[in-house]
């Protein structure tokens, strides 16, 4: 697949790049994408939710009534979960939600997501650029010029650029990451993918 490389003012740079078929032209594997996204979301969970069970609530342990002959069910303590203020039954406990996934499955998921974006014509190539200072308005102007769309945009840089990152921080629908941070969830969650020239070569090299 061949794409034109645009300048930040929206004009063509005169250069075009050929995307590697091993990265942008594979047959997408939906199950691999599902597993990778599931792992990513699970790993974001803190796992710190906690409720008190009947051994932890502060109540008297005095038996409420005699065992038999009371005309009702047997009760041994107000800590029981059936009483208001009693302990929680089978409530959440601190736990680790992280899970593992094979590297080959993660790699397949990533190239599958990139291939989906290529099939949807959702990839825009832009030549390398720098910003002298963090300016959100300037970054918005660049995205508008290259017609990246007004929906969720994922911009991938070959290396970290603090000014570009800070320019996007207040934009709800724009996320800037480096090629080292790219992941299946970020790709699938974006409507359009803006690749700074050079990123495609790094991705292709890592797949080999």
Image (cartoon, rainbow, N blue to C red):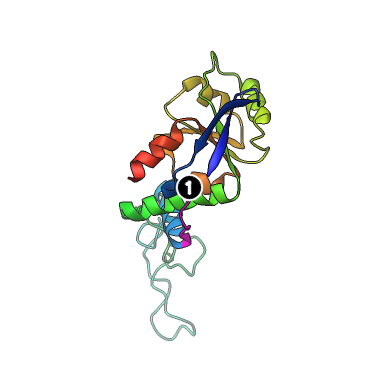
* Residue 27 among magenta residues: yes
Q: Name the residue under label 1.
A: 24
For the point 46% across and 81% down, which residue is it?
A: 73
In the image, residue 125 sits, relative to residue 25, either above or below, namely: above
Rendered image quadrant of residue 154: top right
Q: Quadrant of residue 205?
A: top left
- For the stretch drawn in magenta, what is the main secondary structure? loop
Residue shown at 44%/31% (left/top)? 198
Task: Based on the picture, tell me whether residue 150 belongs to the magenta stretch.
Answer: no
Residue 135 visible, this angle: yes
Which image quarter is the C terminus in?
Answer: top left
Q: Which region of the structure is painted magenta?
A: 24-30
- Asked whether residue 100 is in view, the answer is no
Res 59 → quadrant? bottom left
- Mark 1 burial class by Cα count in 10 Å: few <14, some 14-19, many 20+: many
Q: Is mark 1 on a helix, strand or loop?
A: helix
Expressed as whole percent of the image width and height from the top left, the position of residue 174 reads 59, 35
Tell me: 92 left or right of 208.
Answer: right
Question: Number of marks in the image?
Answer: 1
Give the residue at the far top of this rendering: 132
Relative vertical location of residue 22 with respect to residue 157 in this rendering, above or below: below
Name the residue at 39% across, 41% down.
204
- Front residue (pair 182, 95): 182
Residue 35: give x, y in percent of width and height.
42, 58
Query: Which of 3 and 77 lies nearest the eye of the viewer?
Result: 3
Q: Nearer the viewer, residue 143 or 177?
A: 143
Q: Against 129, is 90 above or below?
A: below
Residue 125 locus on image (x, y percent): 55, 34
């Amino acid at each position: 697949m061949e794409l034109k490389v645009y300048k930040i003012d929206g004009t063509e740079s005169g250069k075009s790049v050929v995307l590697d078929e091993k990265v942008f032209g594979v047959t997408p594997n939906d199950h691999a994408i599902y597993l990778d996204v599931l792992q990513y979301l699970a790993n974001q969970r803190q796992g710190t939710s906690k409720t008190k069970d009947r051994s932890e609530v502060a109540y008297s342990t005095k038996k409420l009534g005699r065992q038999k002959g009371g005309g009702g069910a047997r009760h041994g303590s107000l800590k029981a979960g059936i009483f208001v203020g009693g302990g929680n039954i089978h409530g959440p406990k601190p736990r680790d939600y992280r899970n593992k996934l094979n590297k080959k499955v993660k790699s397949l998921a990533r190239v599958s997501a990139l291939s989906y974006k290529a099939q949807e014509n959702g990839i825009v190539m832009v030549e390398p650029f720098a910003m002298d200072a963090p300016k959100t308005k300037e970054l918005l102007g660049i995205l508008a010029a290259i017609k990246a769309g007004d929906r969720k945009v994922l911009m991938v840089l070959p290396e970290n650029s603090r000014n570009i990152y800070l320019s996007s921080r207040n934009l709800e629908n724009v996320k800037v990451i480096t090629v080292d941070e790219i992941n299946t969830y970020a790709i699938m969650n974006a409507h359009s993918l803006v690749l700074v020239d050079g990123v495609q070569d790094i991705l292709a090299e890592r797949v080999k």
